[in-house]
Every structure is written in C-alpha cells, then in structure tokens.
Image (cartoon, rainbow, N blue to C red):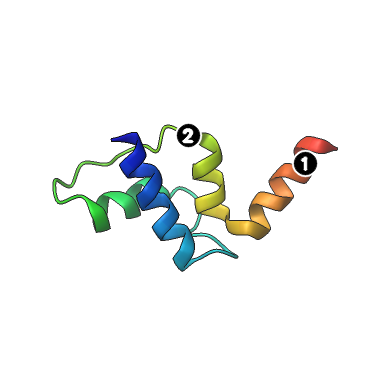
C-alpha cells in the first residue's frame, strides 16, 4: 500500500513539479484521483507530503529554513 501511495505521489508531483498541488491537498487528490473508495489517505511520509504539496520551490525554502 505505501509503495502504491508513493507511486501515486510521484505521478501527481510530475504534473505540478515547480509549485506543487497546494498545502493540505496531497491526501485529498490522491484519494480523489486514484482510489474509488473515497477514503482519505495519508502518505505516511512527511517529506513526500511537503514535496508534493509545495513543489520544488516551496520544498527548497522549507529545506533552507531547516539549514539556517
């Protein structure tokens, strides 16, 4: 299940690599587009969630904040 979620996250990331899908939308989009049950899922990986939601630009700023 987690490998499948990571693959779905990678697919969504490839659609919005620079800006991401938006804060808090990763679980909603993965559930809506890839699972028919309607159940909201969690990626169980904070790094995947940050990169997917904020894209390359936002993730870079997040990482810079940790390094400062």
Question: Decide: marks 2, 1 in contact (CB < 8 A)?
Answer: no
The residue under the point 14% across, 51% down is 36
User: Does residue 1 appear left or right of residue 53 in this picture?
Assistant: left
| Residue 35 place in picture, x, y as percent | 20, 50
Mark closest to the chain's N terminus, 2 or 1:
2
Is residue 20 found left or right of 8 in the rendered image? right
Q: Helix or strand or loop: what does disc 2 sit on?
A: loop
Quadrant occupied by the C terminus: top right
Mark 1 is surrounded, within 10 Å at the Cα level, by few (under 14), some (14 to 19) or many (20 or more) other residues, namely: few
* CA separation in Å, label 2 and label 1: 19 Å
Place of residue 18 in the rendered image (x, y in percent of width and height, measured from the top left):
60, 65
Q: Where is residue 19 shown, x and y percent of the image?
A: 58, 64
In this rendering, the count of numbered labels is 2
Residue that label 2 marks? 45
Q: Residue furthest top?
A: 44
Question: Which residue position holds label 1?
Answer: 65
Seen in the image, is 52 located left or right of residue 61? left
In-front residue for pair 17/21? 17
Quadrant where the N terminus sits is top left
- Residue at 40% across / 44% down in the picture? 6
Number of residues whose C-alpha sits closer than 10 Å to that of mark 2, classed few (under 14), some (14–19) or many (20 or more): few
Please state which of the two labelled residues, at mark 2 or mark 1, is closer to the viewer.
Answer: 2
On the image, which quarter does residue 15 sit in?
Answer: bottom left
Q: Position of residue 29 (x, y in %)?
A: 34, 55
């Amino acid at each position: 299940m987690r490998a499948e979620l990571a693959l779905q996250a990678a697919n969504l990331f490839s659609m919005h690599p620079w800006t991401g899908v938006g804060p808090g939308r990763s679980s909603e989009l993965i559930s809506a587009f890839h699972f028919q049950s309607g159940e909201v899922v969690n990626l169980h990986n904070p790094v995947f969630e940050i990169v997917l939601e904020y894209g390359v630009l936002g993730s870079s700023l997040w990482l810079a904040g940790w390094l400062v």
